[in-house]
Image (spheres, rainbow, N blue to C red):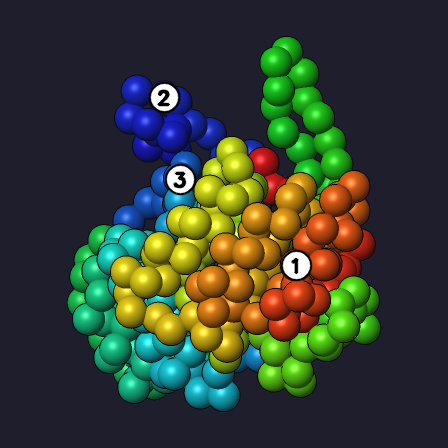
């Protein structure tokens, strides 16, 4: 590769990218590009509905599921139009010309889709360095490897995707049907963001997230602040956490921001404190029993 994570580092890829996608246009794919593409493919594979994701530094800064691809794109971009600049765009639907015209307004490095409809490639190829990829397969290896110290560690892929059937309501108030759909959506997203992470979602749109924080409270505060920065009203939004809340303070912060439904794994010795706060303040909360750390 041209170089590794930074220009002073060497980079090599071992594998067969042609099994995963075909490059239709653009410059050579870099080390960092591959890491972002990998993160995006893993994320988009968990969605059956028409979905658009914008990846920046392995995390989704925008994501939405809609009936029409152009609406999924617009709402994904609205989640964080600042971070989207120079990002990696990934969708699970063939890109039509109307959507491509909107996408073309943004500077981005890479786009990956299962197909491109008539005249779309001609438009997107207007930038010579823009990397355009067509996905071939979403079957990724079941075992993951990472080099650490003077060896290698191995684990199985986190392939659990919770549905409403995996949710256990632990509060007096149960989430509404609309909230359940958003909780499922948010939980899919939180699984693929760096820990500690919090996701806030509304109407199957990623409103904001707090990622890579050393404190879960800090992750939540970051997400709330980010949502406010882009003008989102959190009343009616839901919150997902990749791991349990050690204290009830996260539920209190969410409540004061307008969030009324929470999904989390549960398992803290102080779960009762969080449940009691939710019951006292009219919040619904569900447990999944599954933690989704991503280091």
Quarter of image, res 79: bottom left
Residue beneath label 1, please? Answer: 277
Rendered location of residue 274, percent (x, y): 68, 54
Q: Nearer the viewer, mark 1 or mark 2?
A: 1
Element on which disc 3 rests: helix
Residue at the image point whose x is 50% and y is 77% from the top: 236
Residue beneath label 2, please? Answer: 9
Rendered location of residue 123, percent (x, y): 23, 75
**Residue 45 in view (yes/no):** no
CB under 8 Å between discs 1 and 2:
no
CB under 8 Å between discs 1 and 3:
no
Element on which disc 1 rests: helix
Residue beneath label 3, please? Answer: 32
Residue at the image point whose x is 73% and y is 77% from the top: 174
Residue at the image point whose x is 30% and y is 20% from the top: 8
Rendered location of residue 187, percent (x, y): 63, 62
CA–CA distance in space, label 2 to label 3: 12 Å
Q: Sequence order check: which comes first, mark 2 or mark 3?
A: 2
Q: Sequence order check: which comes first, mark 1 or mark 2?
A: 2
Along the horizontal axis of the image, is 290 left or right of 7? right
Residue at the image point whose x is 21% and y is 60% from the top: 107
CA–CA distance in space, label 1 to label 3: 43 Å
- Of the pair 152 and 255, the residue shown nearer to us: 255
Quarter of image, res 247: top right
């Amino acid at each position: 590769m041209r170089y590794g994570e930074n220009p002073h580092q060497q980079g090599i890829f071992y594998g067969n990218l042609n099994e995963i996608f075909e490059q239709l246009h653009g410059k050579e794919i870099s080390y960092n590009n591959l890491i972002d593409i990998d993160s995006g493919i893993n994320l988009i594979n968990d969605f059956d509905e028409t979905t658009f994701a914008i990846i920046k530094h392995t995390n989704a800064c925008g994501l939405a599921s809609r009936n029409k691809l152009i609406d999924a794109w617009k709402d994904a971009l609205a989640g964080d139009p600042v971070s989207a600049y120079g990002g990696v765009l990934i969708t699970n639907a063939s890109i039509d010309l109307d959507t491509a015209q909107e996408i073309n307004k943004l500077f981005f490095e890479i786009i990956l889709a299962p197909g491109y409809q008539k005249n779309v490639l001609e438009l997107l190829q207007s930038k010579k360095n823009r990397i355009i990829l067509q996905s071939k397969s979403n079957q990724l290896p079941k075992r993951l490897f990472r080099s650490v110290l003077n060896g290698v560690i191995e684990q199985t892929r986190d392939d659990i995707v919770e549905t409403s059937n995996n949710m256990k309501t632990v509060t007096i108030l149960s989430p509404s049907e609309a909230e359940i759909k958003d909780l499922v959506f948010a939980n899919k997203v939180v699984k693929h963001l760096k820990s500690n992470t919090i996701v806030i979602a509304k109407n199957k749109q990623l409103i904001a997230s707090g990622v890579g924080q050393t404190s879960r409270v800090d992750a939540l505060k970051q997400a709330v602040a980010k949502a406010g920065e882009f003008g989102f009203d959190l009343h009616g939004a839901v919150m997902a956490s990749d791991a349990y809340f050690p204290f009830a303070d996260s539920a209190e912060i969410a409540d004061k921001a307008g969030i009324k439904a929470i999904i989390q794994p549960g398992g803290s010795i102080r779960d009762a404190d969080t449940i009691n706060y939710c019951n006292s303040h009219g919040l619904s909360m569900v447990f999944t029993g599954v933690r989704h750390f991503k280091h």
